[in-house]
Image (spheres, coloured by chain):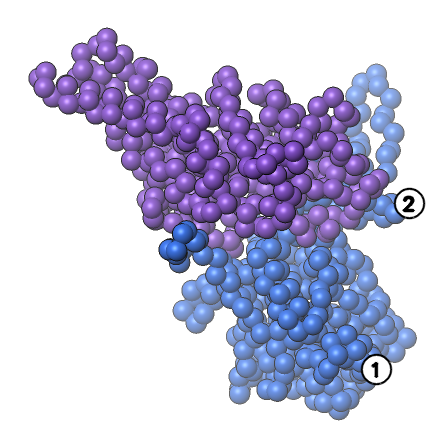
Chain colours: A purple, B blue
Amino acid sequence: MLALGEVQTTTLAHAAEASPAVAEQVLSLVRGERVRTLTRPISYAVSPDLFVGVDCRIPVGNATPVRVVGTVTGRVALTGGRVLQGSVGAWVVPGPTGNRRPWAHYLASPGIVETVARCTDPVGAADAHLAAARSSSTMGMGVYCNRLLAAVQQYQDLDGRPPFTTRRTTLRWVVHVDDGSTGERVEFAIEEDGLRTLRLTVPDPEHLTSAVVREELVALCEDVALHDWLLTSLLSLLERSRIGSDHPAAVVRRLRPAIEHLVHLWMPAARLSGPALGFWDKLERRPGMSRQWNTSVRRIRDQVALSGLLQ
Amino acid sequence: MTGQGAQFQESTARRTLESLPMSHLSIELGHYYSDDLDNDDAYFDLQFRQLGHWFGAASAAMTELVGRRPRISTCFLVDDYFTEPPPPSVLIPKLVSAAGNNDIELDYIARESSCAAAYRNADGDVISDSPAKLTEAKLVEEPPPGTTAARPPVHQTGWLSNGQRSPASGRYEAMKPPEPWRPPRQNVAFRHSIFADIQLWETANGRREWSCAMLAAVWQLVRLGLLRDRGRCVAAAEPVPDRLPDSWGKLPPVVRVNPRATPFNAYRTLTVCAPIFLHVEHAVRTILERVVVDPAVVEEVDRRAAAEGLRLADSVVDRIEYLFVDTGPVRDVGAG
């Protein structure tokens, strides 16, 4: 069993933080299905799941690409009324060889694609997904994700004027089994151009049979993408602020968006429980995003204090 | 969500689903066109006599499957969407009496317009959304080979097919030979193609009119109890009023005419009707094969069925059965 996905993270195209009521309207992407919302420990709203049918090939390292048929699932979430994420993915499972089945079979298990020929190298498929070029995501997931985000950002009541410019980040993730390992492993990499990759491996396929665990692992990937975007955006604001070379008052003015809109959103694993927490702990040891975040926030606060002293 | 020893929940994060009482089987007693409903008592007497044979067979089959006396409810759908049938005060007693004369209990009568329109209360507030619009939102088209999530299948608004349509003909470019005709092709064909292109609705004068096939597909989902509007049931059955109104619009979506009836919704459905309706039901099946029912709803229904010893098919379409038999003349067709 193998899962492939992509999360794109950006800021909501709106000057003010979206209230829970606005969040609910903006994420109502499916008639008759509710937007789920949480207010604690941080405000979070997620759209209903959407599905799109695919019958295409996925690259598998050096071997012939494998044909898969089924549905890819997507959703959009809003955290803190500010950070917008599109998340798409599919679990890849073996199907009967040779022929595609009637469509009703695939719709009975939405969010799953079945291989039509035998895939003997799931790790090869995972590698290929993480190594894919920036502009071409497996099964067209990148374009689908983009389309979902655009649908939300074009909502009529959004003013299209976010309080600061940030770049959108893309996190490509995989979950697969690694028989050879003794425990869970996580590999996180920062690539060029706002691209990141995340690989989660478990030693035992039994770990992935529970739907609750599978859902939690996807939530983990979205959470990592969220915090990576927060850190990336903060570091970018710091870099552009000319901290250390310009007068503190001017620097603080440039850092104002970070203080008003970003600093309070850092809350790793806020909505996660047992199965995913182990992965987060490992990530905090290396690369240790919280350590870098806390240092950067302290640096900003010191600038504010300094600016006050030097008045 | 559970942490170490502490539990925290918020109601807006929970997916609450209204749980419906379920029969094992829902049997629909015939399909009729509006003209047929104008007929006299003798006509319905013949229809229900014929239907009675099959009712007995279905009961026996269900008893064997369930292992004990099964909960079976019957229903009858009145077309008040495309035309104007005789008023409830005239038609309902006629139907109930014809069924009773032939030892069939007629349990529920539904109006077809309730599959199309939102259900409103006396003040005009929406109680539940249009079942047809809810179903439309759940359509996931079947991809032809070579389709990725980036490029969804070419969609014809208001139509649904089970394959790839012939290329648009009638385009001629100067100096080029005309494109040869290519037949349409069913996506998953068993040796040879049976292609279907189904009209789901038509828009005229800014108004949308749903097709018979689409409303019939919605009707099946309603009977199976698989449609929800934000977790709440759509088209709930209500007791028949003591005084029958003279217009169908004044009745709730589904009325219970037999107070001892088992629930309207059922794990499986059976429709007994004249063979003339086969093409419509083929369209219904094609549509339902392309509907994603909320997995949480399916899971809840499946779990309850399993607790009663009934294992349901994974696909919703496989929970629907038909008997295309002679029930007497329908629209002046049939042996009778």
Q: Tag 1: residue type?
A: His
Q: Nearer the viewer, residue B285 or A267?
A: A267
Mark in the foreground, 1 or 2: 2
Residue at point 18%, 11% (across, down) = A247
Mark 1 → mark 2, Cα distance in angstroms: 37 Å
SS label for mark 2? loop
On the picture, is B11 further left or further right than A204?
left
Residue B191 disc label: 2
State the image coordinates of residue B172 (x, y, percent, origin top left): 80, 25
Q: Is residue B183 left or right of residue B85?
A: right
Pick the front one: A210 or B304: A210
Furthest toward the bottom, the residue is B101
Q: Nearer the viewer, residue A43 or B283?
A: A43
Residue type at tag 2:
Arg
Q: Position of residue A264 (x, y in %)?
A: 29, 35
Quadrant for residue A143, please give it.
Answer: top right
